[in-house]
Image (cartoon, grey):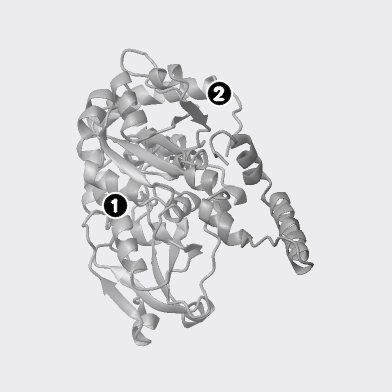
């Protein structure tokens, strides 16, 4: 039988394998019966024959995976970025991320806070990202779109429902829309890089605070009032936490590794130390300190991001298995037993505590399960904040422009269904 000329037959074989299988088994049995009574026997080893011809697997093996593309600056990576990439991944099988170059960010938005290397570590560290294209253009031109379609085999370009305009006022995704290869996702409410820069500049207005925040004086009332305009608008839900969580528990014999911290302004240093911690065991458990605990030990200007925001940023990291939301400062024997912790680790680069109290790692040290890990990077939350405060005027101008566009977005905002 000619396969190509009888394609309709094999289409039905593919979609109705059980019916076809039953038919062939019946035919085989009838043949065997005929053979038993002296007729012509049918000797067809059904499973082997069909699999050898590849009938049942032809379409399944030939189906190409859907590749989707989403680009961005991903400067000051936050849970809104992570949620956008999570939604993008849900629209395909493989997610390719375009990382805009430092030069393009400077030309279109102002100076980036994080370098390309740091932004690459953050994006690559997300659990939903399969591939990263560095030095991506800010605007998707016809030429770059053709590269995406032919060189990178991209099926769809993804972006949020908020407008992305070039300096001349044109739509940055117009070419993808004209090609019919554009899909939209829902923007994550309550956070943006502009908002975070605003929080930093308001909370750490005095650059000296970033260099040496050993004092515990209360902030002036005027500063407290100004900070109120940058209070997080994020409304956490249990569903969002479930979406970010893998929902897997460690096995009974798993080696559980524990590391704790504030994880404020989640950065490349966090990603690298979590990667090293994960390599020490089978399951990585992260303890995230409460806002109150962070303020007590880091100063009342911290944290910049509140507990649930920090928890989602950590959960989005591919090296993390589970988090304790509001972990205690002191690690107790009961806690180690409850979570079956085999190793407690801490990086060599970390923010200093304001108080010279007892060591929070005293118990795991006494049990011989504490390990000090060499931090691959010297970046900290404070050093990130210092970069912004050191270039205060440039970020003030950048934020003033972005704030107006965000205000227009919220004024004209309509409901968009999505995840």
User: Image height check: is 8 above or below 164?
Assistant: below
Percent of width and height locating residue 80: 45, 40
The answer to whether residue 194 is seen in the rendering is yes
Q: Nearer the viewer, residue 59 or 70?
A: 59
Image quadrant occupied by the C terminus: top right
User: Which residue corresponds to the image point at 40% horizontal and 35% vertical from the top-left?
Assistant: 69
Residue lying furthest front in this view? 38
Marking on residue 409: none
Task: Left or right? Give the position of 31 relative to 252.
Answer: right
Q: Are marks 1 and 2 in contact (CB under 8 Å)?
A: no
Q: Nearer the viewer, residue 276 or 23?
A: 23
Task: Left or right? Give the position of 113 relative to 321.
Answer: left
Where on the picture, by quarter, is residue 172? top left
The residue where tag 1 is placed is: 268
The residue where tag 2 is placed is: 413
Image quadrant occupied by the N terminus: top right
Q: What SS does tag 1 mark?
A: helix
User: Which residue corresponds to the image point at 33% horizontal and 30% vertical from the top-left?
Assistant: 150
User: Image height check: is 102 above or below 36?
Assistant: above
Q: Would you call the spot at circle 2 few (<14 residues within 10 Å), some (14-19), or many (20 or more)?
A: few
User: Image height check: is 44 above or below 366?
Assistant: above
Percent of width and height locating residue 38: 76, 66
Q: Would you call the spot at circle 1 few (<14 residues within 10 Å), some (14-19), or many (20 or more)?
A: many
Q: Nearer the viewer, residue 204 or 130?
A: 130
Give me the C-alpha separation between circle 1 and circle 2.
Answer: 33 Å
Total number of numbered discs in the rendering? 2
Task: Left or right? Give the position of 11 relative to 224.
Answer: right
């Amino acid at each position: 039988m000619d396969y190509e000329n009888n394609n309709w037959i094999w289409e039905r074989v593919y979609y109705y394998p059980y019916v076809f299988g039953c038919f062939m088994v019946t035919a085989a049995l009838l043949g065997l019966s005929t053979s038993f009574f002296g007729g012509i026997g049918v000797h067809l080893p059904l499973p082997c024959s069909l699999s050898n011809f590849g009938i049942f697997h032809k379409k399944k093996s030939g189906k190409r995976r859907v590749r989707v593309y989403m680009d961005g600056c991903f400067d000051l990576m936050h849970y809104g970025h992570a949620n956008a990439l999570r939604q993008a991944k849900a629209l395909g099988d493989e997610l390719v991320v375009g990382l805009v170059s430092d030069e393009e960010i400077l030309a279109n938005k102002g100076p980036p806070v994080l370098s390309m290397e740091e932004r690459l570590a953050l994006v690559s560290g997300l659990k939903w990202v399969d591939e990263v294209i560095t030095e991506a253009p800010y605007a998707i031109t016809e030429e770059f779109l053709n590269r995406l379609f032919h060189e990178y085999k991209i099926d769809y370009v993804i972006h949020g429902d908020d407008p992305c305009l070039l300096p001349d006022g044109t739509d940055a995704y117009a070419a993808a829309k004209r090609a019919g290869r554009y899909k939209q996702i829902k923007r994550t409410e309550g956070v943006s890089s502009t908002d975070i820069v605003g929080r930093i500049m308001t909370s750490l207005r005095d650059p000296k605070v970033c260099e040496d925040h050993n004092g515990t004086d209360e902030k002036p009332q005027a500063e407290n009032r100004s900070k109120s305009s940058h209070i997080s608008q994020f409304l956490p839900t249990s569903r969002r936490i479930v979406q970010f969580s893998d929902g897997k528990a460690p096995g009974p014999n798993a080696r559980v590794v524990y590391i704790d911290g504030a994880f404020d302004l989640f950065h490349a240093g966090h990603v690298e130390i979590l990667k090293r911690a994960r390599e020490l065991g089978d399951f990585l458990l992260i303890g995230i300190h409460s806002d109150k605990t962070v303020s007590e030990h880091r100063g009342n200007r911290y944290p910049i991001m509140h507990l649930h925001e920090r928890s989602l940023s950590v959960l989005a990291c591919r090296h993390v298995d589970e988090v304790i939301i509001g972990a205690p400062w002191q690690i107790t024997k009961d806690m180690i037993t409850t979570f079956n912790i085999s190793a407690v680790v801490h990086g060599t680069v970390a923010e200093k505590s304001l108080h010279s109290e007892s060591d929070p790692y005293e118990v795991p040290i006494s049990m011989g399960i504490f390990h000090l890990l060499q931090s691959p990077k010297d970046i900290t939350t404070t050093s990130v904040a210092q970069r912004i405060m050191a270039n205060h005027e440039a970020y003030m101008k950048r934020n003033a422009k972005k704030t107006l566009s965000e205000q227009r977005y919220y004024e004209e905002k309509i409901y968009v269904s999505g995840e």
